[in-house]
Image (spheres, rainbow, N blue to C red):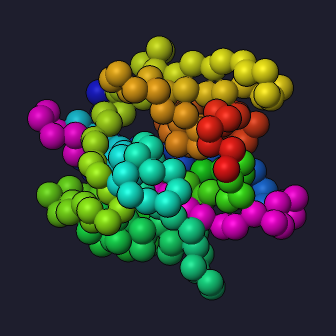
């Protein structure tokens, strides 16, 4: 399904996010550090289709170097997840958005590396303003929403180290894993009007630190 980058699509996605009931905040993860990522929606380019922004992390970073990721990072002291996601978008991609650009939030996802990630869906109208910060971002990619809505976009595999299924997002010649794949998958499900949970979807063993 092609979703043009226009006001009607923005309203439809905002309505889908508003209809999505997040899992309640739990006290089950007191040891996890809070973090946030942005599911940033912008123009795909040719054809003006709506796309989400995906980055390749810089190769010199200490953690998760060279991996696919949604823009985001750890919450600063006293900062809400929405504030953190907006700040990280500015720091990583030069996109300065406000609370008025926020369409909603998805379920928190606990990672094996000790973070509780809140995905924040935002509408980035000024896509021409993207300026990747080379200290953090190696490259930026626009993934059309039709791509994540394909039947074969995601698969699930078993691993001997866990009873939980590992989710994988097939993008071009790459396999993108959780947490990024899990968060994109839930966003895909929200677009379809389904309240699909992803907190039990597993990460590959190499991401367990």
Residue nearest the observer in this picture, 89 or 111: 111
Q: Residue at x 15, y 40 (%)?
A: 45
Query: Furthest-bottom residue in view?
Result: 78
Point out the stretch of residues depicted in magenta: 26-48
Establish if 59 lies above or below 74. above
Q: Is any part of residue 104 visible from this angle?
A: no
Q: Residue at x 71, y 48 (%)?
A: 112
Whole-percent x and y of residue 180? 53, 42
Establish if 191 lies above or below 98. above
Q: Is any part of residue 160 visible from this angle?
A: yes
> Which of the 4 image quarters holds residue 128?
bottom left
> Which of the 4 image quarters holds residue 95?
bottom left
Residue nearest the observer in this picture, 133 or 205: 205
Establish if 158 lies above or below 130. above
Q: Residue at x 66, y 67 (%)?
A: 34
Q: Is residue 13 left or right of residue 142?
A: right
Residue nearest the observer in this picture, 18 or 144: 144
Q: Answer whether residue 69 is magenta in the image.
A: no
Residue nearest the observer in this picture, 138 or 9: 138
Q: Is residue 6 left or right of residue 34?
A: left
Q: Is residue 16 left or right of residue 197?
A: left
Q: Is residue 146 left or right of residue 64?
A: left
Q: Quadrant of the N terminus?
A: top left
Whole-percent x and y of residue 175? 46, 27
Q: Answer whether residue 32 is magenta in the image.
A: yes
């Amino acid at each position: 399904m092609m979703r043009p980058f226009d006001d009607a699509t923005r309203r439809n996605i905002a309505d889908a996010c508003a209809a999505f009931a997040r899992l309640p905040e739990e006290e089950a993860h007191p040891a996890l550090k809070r973090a946030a990522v942005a599911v940033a929606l912008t123009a795909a380019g040719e054809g003006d289709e709506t796309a989400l922004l995906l980055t390749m992390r810089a190769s010199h970073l200490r953690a998760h170097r060279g991996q696919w990721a949604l823009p985001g990072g750890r919450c600063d002291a006293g900062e809400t997840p929405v504030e953190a996601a907006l700040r990280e978008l500015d720091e990583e991609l030069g996109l300065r958005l406000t609370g008025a650009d926020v369409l909603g939030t998805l379920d928190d996802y606990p990672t094996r590396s000790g973070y509780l990630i809140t995905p924040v869906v935002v509408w980035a109208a000024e896509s021409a303003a993207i300026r990747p910060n080379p200290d953090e971002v190696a490259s930026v990619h626009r993934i059309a929403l039709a791509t994540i809505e394909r039947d074969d976009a995601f698969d699930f595999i078993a691993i001997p180290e866990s009873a939980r299924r590992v989710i994988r997002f097939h993008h071009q010649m790459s396999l993108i894993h959780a947490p990024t794949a899990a968060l994109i998958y839930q966003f895909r499900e929200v677009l379809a009007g389904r309240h699909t949970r992803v907190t039990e979807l597993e990460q590959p063993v190499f991401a367990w630190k």
